[in-house]
Amino acid sequence: MGRSVTVTGRGQVAAPYDEAQLRLAASARAASPSDATARATYAMSAMRESVLRAGVADTDLATTHVSLAPVHDPWPTVAGYEASLSLTVRLGELAGVGTVLVAAVDAGGDGARVEGISFTHRDPSALQRRARDEAYADARAKAEQYAALAGVALGEVRHLVEGPVGGPPSPRAVRAMAESGPVPVDAGEGQVLASVTVTWSLGPTA
């Protein structure tokens, strides 16, 4: 196959998050399973309606968990039942995250719970393409340097393999993208990584 050089290039692109997911829940305890379920359902229905009134489309809502379990006090005596429902809310407008969150909690009352919030990129594929561009440019720069050090010309690409990147790094909360209402929410930015291993042929002396 002749002389060649193989190098690995890495690319990294950072961009502010532009989409959020709220994880809301409603829970209730009662003496009977039906009462516990009814109370949790009432609280969740109120939370859901408040989210819809805030302008979130029903297609951006998803029920993610429903449970009903006995409460023992002491074991194995059944002292009541606890029902719980969870709802994921996808928000494309980060400026309203705080307002939606407060409205949902107010609507749900004592049964309202907030299980968490996460942020994502709406179009990660565009960021991934940019990261690949950087990874390839990094690989070529390394190959050109090695070829120059060896006193030869860099030839054509013989082999190219996209490699693992070791998982995404932790997001950095660097700017308040969703600050609104009484609850400031910092969306920050996330990074998209790419890795590529490329083999170039080495030509005659440069």
Image (cartoon, grey):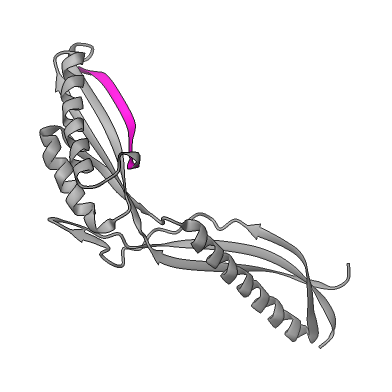
* Place of residue 121 in the rendered image (x, y in percent of width and height, measured from the top left): 41, 57
In the image, is residue 169 part of the stretch drawn in magenta?
Answer: no
Picture layout, residue 113 above or below residue 69: below
Q: Is residue 142 left or right of residue 205?
A: left
Q: Of residues 148 and 89, which is closer to you in this image?
A: 89
* Place of residue 120 in the rendered image (x, y in percent of width and height, measured from the top left): 39, 54
* Place of residue 193 in the rendered image (x, y in percent of width and height, measured from the top left): 52, 62
**Image: magenta residue range:** 60-72
Picture layout, residue 35 above or below residue 115: above
Q: Of residues 117 and 91, which is closer to you in this image?
A: 91
In the image, is residue 69 part of the stretch drawn in magenta?
Answer: yes
Residue 124 visible in the current orientation: yes
Using the rendered view, name the quadrant where residue 38 is placed.
top left
Q: Residue at x 35, y 59 (%)?
A: 18
* Magenta stretch, main secondary structure class: strand
Q: Residue at x 27, y 45 (%)?
A: 56
Q: Residue at x 24, y 47 (%)?
A: 55
Picture layout, residue 122 above or below residue 154: above
Using the rendered view, name the quadrant where residue 28 is placed.
top left
Residue 73 visible in the current orientation: no
Q: Residue at x 51, y 67 (%)?
A: 12
Give the position of the N terminus as an image quadrant: bottom right
Picture layout, residue 109 above or below residue 172: above
